[in-house]
Image (tube, helix red, strand yellow):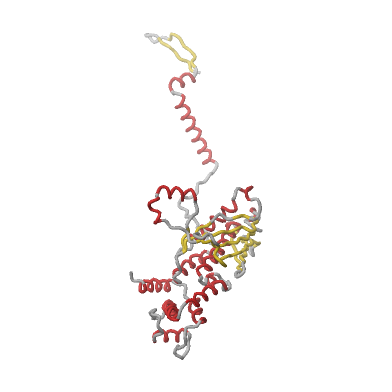
Amino acid sequence: MFICFDRDAAGNTKQFSMIRRENIINEKYPMNIKKRFLTLLLISLVIHAGCFKGIKVNDINEKPVPIETMLSNALSDLGLMTEIYGSSSLKIQSAPLVDRTGPEWKKGGEISRSFTEKIKSAVSSIGGRVKFIPYDPVFAHVQMVKYETDIEKRLFPDVVIEGEIINFNPGEKEKGGKGCSARIAFDFIDFHTLASIPRVRTENDVQVNKGKKRNTLGIMLSGSLYQKEGAIEKTNGGGDRATRMLVELSVIQLIGKHLAIPYWRLLDGAEADPIVFDAIKWTYYKMDEREKISKVQELLFLHGYDVTPSGTMNMETKIALQDYENTQTLFHRPVDQNLFFKLYLSLPITDETLEKRFYLDRMLNPS
């Protein structure tokens, strides 16, 4: 309440009245201004209350930590391997995974989306001659309508990863993922024919166990040709990291099988893949003698020998083969399968070899 005094011309008090404070505010401040004022006042009080309670804001200068696993280097080395071996360009797309573990609709497709995103991350991490093309029907339709005249510029996949989650147990969240287990199977589907590519299939599983140290978890990756133990910290999300490594292993195997390159060299302790051996053998059988010699000369050059691919068994090629096989006898026999395999499977996966590959490509294709 306010007491207001009215005075006459001489300054004497004439009368007084009681006026409510609300009436004065209403006359001076419209309703919308009042609401804004009260809102700002409330926000200010909340901020100050948070500061007094010790709420901290993350340091904006803190750098994000990249997600790395014990297969991260193998992924990037696979990209390097595709360049060194002169593999054809491989454009990959991934279809949504099928969950065979139960009624996934109760979880809103959460498991399949998680695995599908990990496939995208794994393929995108490879580089080299491998490209990932996202699957988004809505985006593709909009682009087709909007840029119909530029359709020739668009890249279409060569293959599609089709997979299924055979088994999945999320494990114990309060223990960082201990007890998590999963099994997945992947296939390559030809994008243009929609037919599955024969023998290009993987099936692997992962298990998260108690670690040897208090703050670690044990990881066991296993498949038909590979078994590897590792360890991660509990704070790193054991279950999520375990399934990420499972996807990475399967992607490496799929691409290695399809391109017929010795991918097992990138996986510590892995066995040689007989499917890749068969693919190399069939390639060897299809070549005539001149093609075999030319390919051997190319491999010798990548091994560091001063040999030019010509398709003829010249003296420089014979001397290089003599040195490669570490014999005193000048090479004189035809190029056999064992020699071809030996040269092909042992190429150094290094930047120096990559430089030789680029030089060789410029030499053979000067245009």
Q: Quadrant of residue 155?
A: bottom left
Which residue of the protein is positioned furthest toward the bottom in this rendering? Answer: 329
Q: Quadrant of the C terminus?
A: bottom left
Which is nearer the eye, 54 or 164? 164
Along the horizontal axis of the image, is 229 left or right of 122?
right
Q: Image height check: is 57 above or below 164?
A: above
x and y percentages locating residue 42 in the rendered image: 51, 33
x and y percentages locating residue 273 in the rendered image: 57, 72
Q: Quadrant of residue 362?
A: bottom left
Which is nearer the eye, 363 or 120? 363
x and y percentages locating residue 198 in the rendered image: 56, 66
Q: Image height check: is 347 above or below 145?
A: below
Which residue of the protein is positioned furthest toward the left in this rendering? Answer: 367
Q: Image height check: is 315 above or below 205?
A: below
Is residue 79 among what the camera can see?
yes
Query: What is the count of numbered marks?
Result: 0
Q: Residue at x 41, y 10 (%)?
A: 7
Along the horizontal axis of the image, is 304 left or right of 214?
left
Which is nearer the eye, 141 or 94? 141
Is residue 303 among what the camera can see?
no
Which is nearer the eye, 349 or 360? 360
x and y percentages locating residue 142 in the rendered image: 44, 47
Q: Residue at x 38, y 51 (%)?
A: 149
